[in-house]
Image: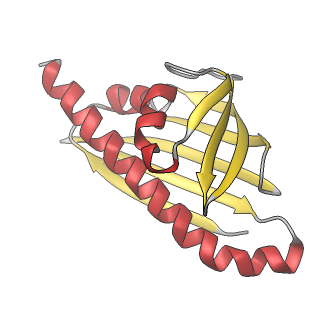
Amino acid sequence: MPAIHLETSIDAPPDIVFDAARDVTVHIESARDTGERAVAGVTHGPMDLGDTVTWEARHFGVPMRLTVRISELDRPRMFADVMVEGPFRSMRHVHRFVTLPTGTRMIDDFEYAAPLGPVGSIASLILTPYLRRFLARRADVLRRLAESRARRSL
């Protein structure tokens, strides 16, 4: 099962970073390149334990639909979302937030199983780097937004 691990240092307190990371509106902004939009479930604002959202986006030029559910939540330390329905055989994204002297370390652990058996394994060779870039762009948008919110709250 392919896995992606990213760490991002953010000059903002964990509660600000945590709230930005689970906010559907922020996610839409961070995924602007794919035209991602929330079409069902929670369609704006923060998600809580048990909430679902259905995303529509275009990846590799193909329209896709993905429904995820917040399966774990421990504010402001972590939350996890899992695929309920979508293009993967399975998908789990764990978001962790570690307090640092200067802010927060945001840790993304993303695991997925590609569909189509052996063909999916080959597709993962392209899909994993693509998803890593997608998650890194999202983390950068979250970093900038959280740091801006932290400066305003001073």
Q: Position of residue 34 (x, y in %)?
A: 51, 49
Q: Residue at x 79, y 54 (%)?
A: 90
Quadrant (top left, top right, bottom left, bottom right) of the N terminus: bottom right
Residue 123 in view: yes
Q: Residue furthest front?
A: 61
Q: Residue furthest right?
A: 117
Q: Position of residue 145 (x, y in %)?
A: 28, 34
Q: Is residue 52 above or below residue 7?
A: above
Q: Residue at x 59, y 21 (%)?
A: 43
The quarter of the displayed image where residue 67 is located: top right
Q: Is residue 24 above or below residue 117?
A: above
The quarter of the displayed image where residue 52 is located: top right
Q: Residue at x 23, y 25 (%)?
A: 149
Q: Is residue 128 above or below residue 106?
A: below
Number of callouts = 0
Most foreground residue, 74 or 51: 51
